[in-house]
Image (spheres, helix red, strand yellow):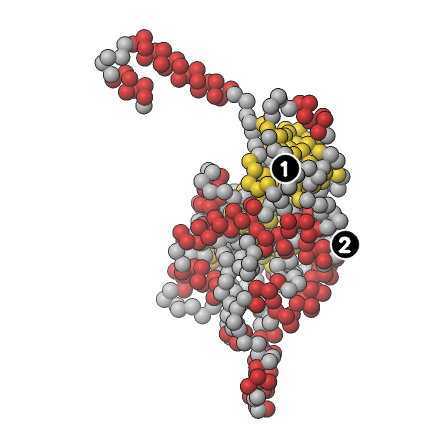
Amino acid sequence: MILVHLIRNEHMNVSRIFLFAVGILAATQLAAQSPSPRTLVKAGRLLDPRSGNVLSPAAVLIEGGKIKEVGSPSQVQGHAPAGVKTIDLGSATLLPGLIDSHTHLLMDDIVRQPEAERARHLNGGYAPAQLLAIVESPSKRVLIGAQMAREDLESGFTTLRNLGHSGIDGDTELRDAINAGRVPGPRILASGRKLITRGDYVQNLNPALADAILEQEFLLIDGTDRARQAVRKNVFQNVDVIKVTADENLTVPELTAVREEAHRNHLKLAVHAVDKTSIQTAIDAGADSIEHGNEATDAQLKQMHDKGIFFDFTPTSYGDFFTRIFEATIVEDLTLRPERIGADEPHRQRDNNLVQQIRNSWLKSPDESDKQDDQQYNSLVQRVLKSGVKFAAGSDMDWHYPEKTRGETTASRFPTLHEAGMPSLDVIRAITTNAAEMLGWQDRVGAIEPGKFADLVAVAGDPITDITQLERVRFVMKDGKVFRNDIQENHSK
């Protein structure tokens, strides 16, 4: 535009215009040929999750947002240009950027139903928050998602797979905004709307409004043709993965149609499957990953192993997680109510019956279910490890945890796998190298290796001997850019 303006200016002679144009061209070529910014990161230790080996001391040379060289400081520094920017993390341990392979950024559930009300509804512990999110402004949800994404990044999660509950295009638009540098956040693989059968998640909606409400959040599967159409609608939104919730109403032919259409568009298929029937449907249809898988049998794990299907752990409720988030709400504990009100026997029996109804509902009273559920999950972890099936782990996070950021809450879920019996190194693999393979991004993320994105995190101690170090990430780099550096021994230049 400047050149056009000069040409139109009568007082500018042709030779001066020519020289100006040559100057612009030369400057453009010089900028294109100038070397990419380089950074040297040094640390006391570097853990390679794939092999379990530790390099000590360690250095990583970064150029143009990618890892160029990894080795000892003396070796790598010898290949770095003079005056290279150096970040010295002292005795800290470097790890690849962490990967949460199952999350819901555009949900921050703070809706807590009283116990009696939860028991009266299908999915009573979750549906109210889901419906509120659907009817709220999509713009508000994306802004919530931007906050959740930033907080996840600050806690070391440089890659996320967002699996639904994001409206029609909330997660794809958030992904694009992050990629364009408009807002800070991790790399996102976005699934768009979740594919479900009618009756999943919510029921008994106003018939005049039901379809309009559901279509803001879900795509319905009703036969193989509609299953393919659902995938195509998400492809139109430029998704990175297809997510399906399997229940007893979903047929193998329907899910197979989804898988075929997804693979035809070079997209992986992640299937939410909790009960045995749904897990078998996912296996028979050829899912790429089974999310949750809580009731998987040994025979099903063997089938998954033989077919190369990933098992994606989601230890969201392990321990006292739900007890803690429910502590922030005012709900009446029905187990104590009869004593508080001095109830007579008929009223006491009525309350006891209601307590039993709640305990049999989808979301049990948290303190009652913690120990029993944890024992079952311990067994699941051991059986998955013994089976040899490929596994990764995700937080399944969409809950608001009092006094924690989303990133801190996300990070708190993975050390629970160690409590359930998984070795620390396998926990780290589940959210780095293994997760990268499950996502199909093993050539980009998941390890500190030449050619991969410069996504690095550091903790102060040794995460192998203390897996809770993952909850206290103190340095975060994504694409060669530092987003957090709390290392006290920092000597950055």
Q: Give the mark, 2 or 1, whose residue is nearer the N terminus.
A: 2
Q: Residues within 10 Å of mark 2 (few under 14, many from 20)?
A: few
Q: In which quarter of the image is residue 63?
A: top right
Amino acid on which the number 1 mark rests in the picture:
Asn
Residue shown at the point (55%, 36%) measured from the top left? 481
- Element at badge 1? loop
Coordinates of residue 339 in the picture (x, y in percent): 59, 85
Residue in the picture at 72% in, 65% down? 375
Q: Name the residue under label 1.
A: 490
Q: Which residue bears the numbered disc 2?
A: 386
Which kind of residue does numbered mark 2 sit on?
A: Lys
Residue drawn at the location 72% of the way across and 58% of the way down: 419
Spatial CA distance of label 2 from label 1 is: 42 Å
Residues at discs 2 and 1 in contact (Cβ within 8 Å): no
Q: Of discs 2 and 1, which sits in the foreground?
A: 1
Marker disc for residue 225: none
Which residue is at the far top?
15
Position of residue 339 relative to residue 283, above or below, is below
Q: In this view, does 293 lie to the left or right of 206?
A: right
Number of marks in the rendered image? 2
Whether residue 426 can be seen here: no
Between 186 and 196, the one nearer to me in the picture: 186
The x, y position of residue 105, in whole percent, is 51, 52
Find numbered disc 2 in the image and state the secondary structure of the residue it sits on. helix
Residue 327 appears in the rendering: yes
Q: In the displayed structure, does residue 57 sit left or right of residue 129?
A: right
> Horizontal and vertical percent for residue 205?
42, 68
Pick whichever, 270 or 376, lies toward us.
376
